[in-house]
Image (tube, rainbow, N blue to C red):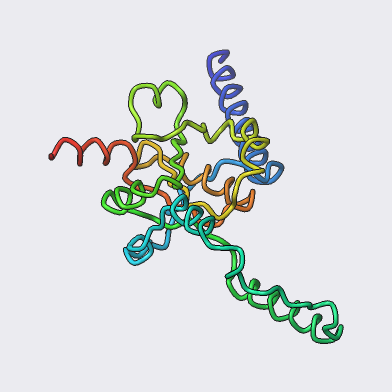
């Protein structure tokens, strides 16, 4: 009899715990863990985006060599009528809105290699420091996705138009997606996720 009561009490406790867990995760916590893994669908980057990578240092040097007297004369825009200025502002605002929200794009091994030819491209490893220490892509730096807040003061002042490659272990690893979303939230516009990640990089390197 006592044994039956004990089993009954255990089942009741398990049932109450399960209900509370579902309630906390799904209702009271907006950042709760999804019970069903959502498949992430990313737009795949086109090879055309990387065909004409420009070395920014070359551009700067070329601009510095232009004689001052050949620069175009700055026009006086102070006399422009106010209605025209308002129309220009409205047009640019509409154009930005039509572009839609910034989203990361998926890239493969060969596209990563093309991007790495541009010294201005930043490569970020979203894994923890121990995994990063065991091996990582050349010239990459470690920003652990789950500790992103501590890097915000450094990142927030950077040029938001630079290209950024984000990767993690590959496969089921979600850290690269989380880091990419955080970077987009800070205003970065050109984010590429190397879906194959470190595992794919190692496999391709071994084939050579």
Q: Quadrant of the N terminus?
A: top right
Instruction: Give the residue drawn at x 35%, y 65%.
Output: 46
Which residue is at the front of the view, 56 or 73?
73
**Residue 4 occupies which quadrant of the picture?**
top right
Which residue is at the front of the view, 4 or 202?
202
x and y percentages locating residue 125 in the rendered image: 44, 36
Q: On screen, 129 above or below 66?
A: above
Which residue is at the front of the view, 83 or 153?
83
Q: Is residue 42 left or right of residue 189?
A: left
Instruction: Give the residue drawn at x 51%, y 33%.
Output: 143
x and y percentages locating residue 38 in the rendered image: 46, 52
**Residue 15 occupies which quadrant of the picture?**
top right
Q: Residue furthest left?
A: 208
Q: On screen, 68 above or below 81?
A: above
**Residue 84 occupies which quadrant of the picture?**
bottom right
Q: Quadrant of the C terminus?
A: top left
x and y percentages locating residue 30 in the rendered image: 67, 46
x and y percentages locating residue 186 in the rendered image: 64, 48
Q: Is residue 4 left or right of residue 80?
A: left
Which residue is at the front of the view, 190 or 10?
190
Instruction: Give the residue drawn at x 38%, y 58%.
Output: 53
Instruction: Give the residue drawn at x 56%, y 33%.
Output: 146
Total count of labels: 0
């Amino acid at each position: 009899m006592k044994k039956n009561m004990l089993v009954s009490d255990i089942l009741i406790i398990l049932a109450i715990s399960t209900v509370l867990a579902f309630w906390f995760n799904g209702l009271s916590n907006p950042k709760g863990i999804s019970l069903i893994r959502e498949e992430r669908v990313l737009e795949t980057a086109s090879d055309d985006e990387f065909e004409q990578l420009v070395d920014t240092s070359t551009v700067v040097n070329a601009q510095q060599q232009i004689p001052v007297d050949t620069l175009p004369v700055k026009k006086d825009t102070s006399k422009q009528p106010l209605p025209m200025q308002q129309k220009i502002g409205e047009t640019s605002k509409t154009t930005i809105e039509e572009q839609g929200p910034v989203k990361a794009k998926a890239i493969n091994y060969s596209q990563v290699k093309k991007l790495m030819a541009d010294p201005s491209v930043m490569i970020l490893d979203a894994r923890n420091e121990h995994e990063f220490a065991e091996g990582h892509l050349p010239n990459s730096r470690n920003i652990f996705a789950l500790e992103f807040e501590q890097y915000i003061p450094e990142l927030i002042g950077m040029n938001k138009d630079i290209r950024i490659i984000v990767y993690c272990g590959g496969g089921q690893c979600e850290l690269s997606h989380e880091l990419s979303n955080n970077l987009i939230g800070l205003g970065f516009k050109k984010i590429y996720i190397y879906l194959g990640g470190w595992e794919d990089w190692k496999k391709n390197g071994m084939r050579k």
